[in-house]
Image: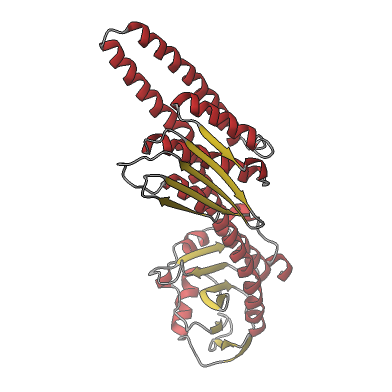
């Protein structure tokens, strides 16, 4: 039973199913009518959770499922109780043993439960014997286990139940940790996808919208030849955006290897397209010195794309520079507008900051009196 308590659950099934599996094994081992576990949902919580597992017999399931925390006997946190009522054909007082958990051992303790309370519980659930032990996780009291059966319990049963729950709670805490890690990873992935959609989908549509507005104004002025040329250019930009979307979907399927060793080529292609679309030439420095994994390379590429987009949208720069600096512990990406861009409102690039923070890095923005600004992203290796 102790061995089973440590190997009961698959973390994919979650905490509740792990608890249910543990209670069923306990019920089978003790041949009990019911096993009931009350657990606190967290520190400072006002209510408790009740997990029940009962023998499948007529009427018993409904009685056990109807139990609430208020209907279960209240006991001091360290109290252990074994209560055995006398048989009908042998009248006499009930046998009661009370102990407490101290220093990992079970010792005799003061009477902690009135017999009438135990009798009420046995009448409600059905059975002749009741065992109750505290449940701990990391030396912290988190709940109580109640086992009810027809055959009498002994103090040794209580000591064994304590050992089983100690092993079981280690497993449950591990499952809970895996759940938290999985939820945290899923949240981080959703945030990453949201940033990619912002950078790779929304911004191209903003550029298309601005282009359409320009075409509209050209048509209103009656310059059809110029409008036609702008429409052809917008069609080309739309085709490029569609290819970017396809590439983004491909990345979501799990293939980011196009960036690892190909980061210099991918960034140079983007810079060339950026210069053609905006008329802002971009100098690239230090890109060939970057040595990192595929995932980090993909993030660096996206951050460089976002930073250049900020240059276009938030400055009046006529030239920009992208620089990479690496050492044994960090890789630094700097994006600078080389021409003064005065009169613009200072800002902190939120999307860049979120990306950098997700990688354990940071973003700084340095502004100079001549209007230039340098955005520096620092990522630990």
Question: As drawn, is 80 to the left or to the right of 68?
Answer: right
- Image position, residue 132 (x, y; %): 55, 78
Quadrant in the picture for the N terminus: bottom right
Q: Quadrant of residue 317?
A: top left
- Residue 170 spot, x, y in % from top left: 63, 69
Q: Residue furthest left?
A: 220
Residue 154 placement: quadrant? bottom right
In the foreground, 346 or 41: 346
Side of 152 relative to 141 (left or right): right
Q: Nearer the viewer, residue 246 or 323?
A: 323
Q: Nearer the viewer, residue 183 or 329?
A: 329
Q: Quadrant of residue 56?
A: bottom right
Q: Is residue 290 above or below residue 313?
A: below
Residue appearing at x 55%, y 32% in the figure:
248
Residue at the location (56% across, 26% down)? 246
**Labels in figure, total:** 0
The structure residue drawn at horizontal position 36% and vertical position 24%, both measured from the top left corner, is: 209
Q: Residue furthest right?
A: 3
Query: Percent position (x, y) of residue 35?
Result: 56, 68
- Colour basis: secondary structure
Q: Is residue 170 left or right of residue 347?
A: right
- Can residue 55 be seen in this snapshot? no
- Residue 295, compared with residue 117, is above or below; it is above
Where's residue 344, x and y in %? 32, 42
Residue 18 visible from this viewpoint = yes
Q: Residue furthest front?
A: 370
Quadrant where the C terminus sits is: bottom right
Q: Is residue 231 above or below residue 379?
A: above
């Amino acid at each position: 039973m102790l061995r089973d308590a440590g190997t009961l659950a698959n973390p994919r099934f979650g905490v509740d199913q792990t608890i249910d599996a543990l209670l069923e094994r306990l019920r089978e081992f003790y041949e009990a009518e019911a096993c009931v576990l009350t657990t606190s949902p967290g520190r400072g919580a006002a209510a408790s959770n009740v997990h029940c597992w009962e023998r499948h017999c007529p009427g018993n399931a409904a009685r056990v499922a109807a139990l609430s925390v208020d209907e279960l006997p209240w006991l001091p946190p360290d109290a252990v109780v074994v209560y055995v009522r006398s048989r009908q054909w042998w009248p006499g007082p009930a046998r009661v043993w009370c102990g407490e958990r101290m220093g990992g051992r079970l010792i005799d303790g003061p009477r902690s439960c009135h017999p009438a309370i135990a009798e009420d519980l046995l009448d409600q659930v059905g059975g002749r014997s009741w065992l109750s032990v505290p449940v701990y996780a990391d030396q912290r009291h988190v709940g109580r286990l109640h086992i009810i059966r027809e055959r009498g319990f002994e103090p040794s049963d209580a000591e064994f139940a304590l050992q089983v729950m100690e092993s079981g709670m280690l497993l449950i805490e591990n499952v809970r940790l895996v759940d938290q890690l999985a939820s945290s990873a899923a949240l981080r992935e959703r945030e990453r996808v949201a940033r990619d959609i912002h950078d790779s989908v929304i911004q191209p549509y903003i550029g298309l919208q601005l282009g359409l507005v320009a075409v509209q104004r050209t048509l209103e002025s009656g310059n059809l030849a110029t409008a036609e040329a702008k429409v052809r250019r917008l069609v080309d930009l739309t085709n490029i955006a569609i290819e970017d979307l396809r590439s983004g979907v491909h990345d979501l399927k799990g293939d980011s290897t196009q960036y690892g060793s190909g980061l210099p080529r991918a960034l140079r292609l983007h810079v060339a397209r950026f210069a053609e679309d905006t008329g802002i030439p971009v100098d690239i420095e230090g890109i060939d010195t970057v040595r990192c994994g595929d995932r980090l390379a993909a993030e660096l590429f996206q951050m460089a794309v976002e930073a250049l987009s900020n240059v276009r949208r938030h400055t009046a720069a006529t030239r920009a520079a992208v620089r990479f600096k690496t050492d044994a512990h960090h890789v630094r990406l700097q994006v600078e507008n080389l021409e003064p861009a005065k009169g613009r409102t200072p800002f902190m690039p939120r999307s860049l900051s979120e990306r950098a923070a997700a990688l354990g890095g940071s973003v700084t923005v340095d502004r100079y009196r001549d209007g230039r600004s340098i955005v520096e992203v620092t990522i630990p290796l």
